[in-house]
Amino acid sequence: MSEAARVSLFATCVVDQVMPETGVATVRLLEAAGCTVDFPAAQSCCGQPALSAGEPEAAAVLARHFLDTFEGSDAIVAPSGSCAAMVHHWYDRLVDPFDRERARAVAGKTYELAQYLVDVLGCTDLGARVDAAVTVHDACHGLRNLGVKAAPRLLLEASGATIVEMVEPETCCGFGGTFAVEHGAVSAPLADDKLTHAAETGVDYLVSSDGACLAHLEGRRRRTHTGPEPVHYAVLLARGLPVPLPAGTAP
Amino acid sequence: MTAPPPSVERLREALIVNRCGVDGPLTSDAAATRVAEVAMSRAAGGPIALPTRDAGVAALELDSRLGALGAHLLHPDDPDWHDRLPGAAVGVTSCAVAVAATGTLAMVAGPGCPRATSLVPAAHICIVRVADVVDELADAIARFAAGPLPSAVSWVGGPSRTSDLEMRTTFGVHGPKTVDVVIFSADSADSAGTLAE
Amino acid sequence: MSVRERDNIVTPGRNFEERARHAVADPELQRALGNLGQRLFTARDVAHDHGDLKDRAAAIRREVLADLDSWLRRVTSTLESLGVIVHHAATAHDARRIIVGIAHAEGVRTVVKSKSMASEEIELNQAFESAGIRSVETDLGEYIVQVAAERPSHMITPAIHKTLGQIRDVLVKVSGDAIEEDREAITQWARKRLRDEFIAGDMGVTGANFVAADTGTIVLVTNEGNGRLCTTLPRVHVAVVPIEKIVPRFTDVATLLPLLTMTATGQRLTNYLSMITGPRREGEVDGPESLHVVLLDNNRRALLGTPYEEMLACIRCGACLNVCPVYRRVSGHAYDAVYSGPMGKVLTPLLSRGSNGRDLPGASTLCGACTEACPVEIPLADLLVRLRADLRGTGALVGARGSAPPPPEGGVARRERPGEGYPWPLARAPVVTPPPRPPSVRSIMFAVWARVWAAPSGYRISTAAARVAVRTLAPGRRWSTTMPGVTGWTRSRDLPLPAPRSFRDRWAARERGDERW
């Protein structure tokens, strides 16, 4: 690359508030790939919780805010398949007609992290070394709306990680937003299925691209003690980056 | 006879996969003998239902052949056909067209060839002319679409089956338990339409 | 009489959540449902190998929906020219009245039925029973649920929720015969039992998989042969045909039929197809003397011109059920509706105008496996999202018959696919016209939340305040086991708490030079 790609990070509200290490890892990976990363401070949430709760007007307010915040970016990268998919799949139908073109334009430059690194930048080897065996849960929205399937695997393979596929990697983990709270009786067994399938592979980590799925799976694992540790693939890769950290700085 | 065309081979394989008995392609004479053999064996002394207006059955002269073997025959113009058909052990029909890709036989209903002959008796024997074998369902449908449609076209893939019991397949639930197919090549240029007259 | 009063619903409960909870805890049901796993990849493999079929099928379905009324007129006149008696039923009530009326007029005492979701939808068996007419289901799975006094739990395999032992017990109980717990034995018992019914039947009732408008041909698929028997032996045949089953041309069947059978069961074709063009003709000795087609609307035409029109493209293959993570865990009875699975979650509130199944669209993870599996490209997950919005309040769903875009010159009116500029913006054209009432507390809370978070300072302040509050209640803890307000989560899972420092806090620290990454 002759010129560094300029990327705006969309951290997503889940990563920002609950799992910031995923955001840190995302920035480190993008910089390892040669990008210049900025973080528009006005950002908040993609609006998914409102839409799946049946409140499209509220979701549209947040959609418009997203467009205002990120319109000027060259590329917008999120460590979340479902948030990036929200922008792609719904924004042009949520916003007012006069904002529709704007929504399409912004959607056209919004990416999930692995999708951006592999499909746009053509990078699979970021210099990260991961000496572990992993299995991949293909988070639903990234998979079905954005086609995120091969990209995280290519990144992990390039880092030296061993990938062992589980049974039914594409089956939903059972999170589903409000479903996880309103239908816990079905949500938890679906997590059990996923954790059991992951356990059967004997790997060290269960990786995925969506923080919410991971929180749901880890939350269940802490009760059942079944299955490998769920972790965002970005966190695993970033831990394997060669950048030395000064003592006292948490990864 | 020269090697059978690829469609016929494909049909044979598909019928076997569908759990049909398959013979042929044979000459008319050999086919007639074979049909009679299978019919007598399946019938085990019980009545054999035959249509009265069916090109394939007529071409193989099955009425006289089976009659000569002492078979008990049942025809749709018999006065109590309706009541006696459930007691028939075998039904013999030909088909208007056979789909090689799926192993499906299409039978046409009309005067003298009732729907029920291939449905009610526990054994069905179907005669297939090589000229009536097509590759794909779309080809068969195109043939039917080329002219007026009969009142019923019944397509059969093999013995009746269900997987309603824990998703495992069993046979003979309502329709015939066995389907035997005899494929033959018409010796003369048989110009009669593929549909029963 | 309401179906719910008559049926033994296998999984008790007042709503989906309760019924699902019972279903998940039922070990025999879970064992039976395990059998469905074989069909999980069927639709995906079909789509992979036959993508062109899928595209053509999707186009054919939408060609009809673009001008359904005109196709209805066409198919009616074609059928009538064949000597078929055509009835138009606006509602389920009309359909029942018409069909019972036919039975009375023809002196029918016994009806033999081939599997038909439409006949379930209109509660036809109950109508026959009230009229003193015996109606016997002949599809083995339907027969089993009929004698068990249950609803079918899956549109293709109605008794999927039952183990072999449960099936045997039900049949023994209703017949008093000694039947072994063996598939062959049960099959042969059913053959004998139902053969008598076929012969005694005066009227056969079926649905239709497709009806061709150009030839008036009714297409029926089965594996068992009961469809053929119902349309061959009895002297009257009534086909209950939902209006969206119309296809323009007989030749379209060559596209739709293999796609239906491959997607539904993985078979290249079902074992039997019946293509029926009119009643028995002069000189024939079997087939029905009179053939009636009852075209059923039941709130379908109200969906035309709305985003929900897409749902009428459904060919009832059951693929969405087979891939749905929720359906595969709870089975059809948890939905307490005729149609279950993802398509049932959409269709039930729509056909009932919002009076049934209001909690169904929310009972989904929105994973999108259904949309992916659908052979005619119905955006099922998107329709569920729309329904969640449109079902707010107690407004009945009414069809806003807006004007559809005109077809392109010489082309088929193919709707734009979702994500490529779906023409109905979500927030602006709700299908529901709720009665004037103030927005619910929930809606207000979401509206406030969105506006607070759309303001940068609002987001920062509210999240910082929440983090302080939580850390005060749960000092030092990363995970909570008992957070109030979300017991639906914490009953079965630990809940992650907000991090001590948010990502943006850390980014700011990095900008200041206090952190290096």
Image: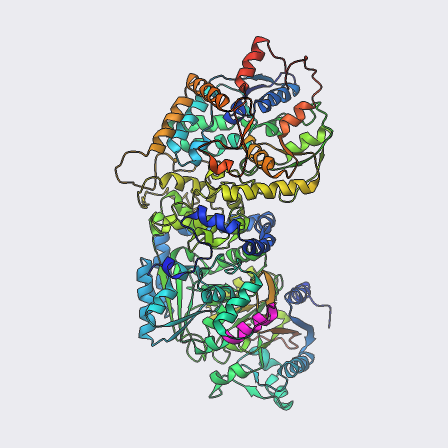
Q: Residue at x 55, y 67 (%)?
A: C168
> Would residue C54 be found to the left or right of residue C393 on screen?
right
Relative image position of residue C491 (x, y in whole percent): 51, 38
Indicate the quadrant where residue C514 lies: top right
Based on the picture, tell me whether residue A69 belongs to the magenta stretch: no
Please provide the residue range marked out in magenta.
C179-194
Q: Residue at x 42, y 56 (%)?
A: C338
Front-most of residues C229 and C285: C229
Q: Where the C terminus of chain A falls, by quadrant?
A: top right
Front-most of residues C391 and C185: C185
Indicate the quadrant where residue A111 lies: top right
Front-most of residues A25 and C172: C172
Front-most of residues B108 and A32: A32
Question: Colour scheme used in the picture?
Answer: rainbow
> Would residue B2 be found to the left or right of residue A29 on screen?
right
Q: Where the N terminus of chain A falls, by quadrant?
A: top right
> Would residue C88 be found to the left or right of residue A108 on screen?
left
Majority secondary structure of magenta residues: helix
Relative image position of residue B178 (x, y in whole percent): 62, 74
> Would residue B47 be found to the left or right of residue A203 on screen?
left
Relative image position of residue C473 (x, y in whole percent): 48, 24
Establish if C437 lies above or below C134.
above
Please indicate, yes or no, whether residue C428 appears anywhere in the rendered image. yes
Establish if B61 lies above or below C86.
below
Based on the picture, tell me whether residue C193 belongs to the magenta stretch: yes
State the residue lying farthest toward the left: C436
Relative image position of residue C160 (x, y in whole percent): 53, 58
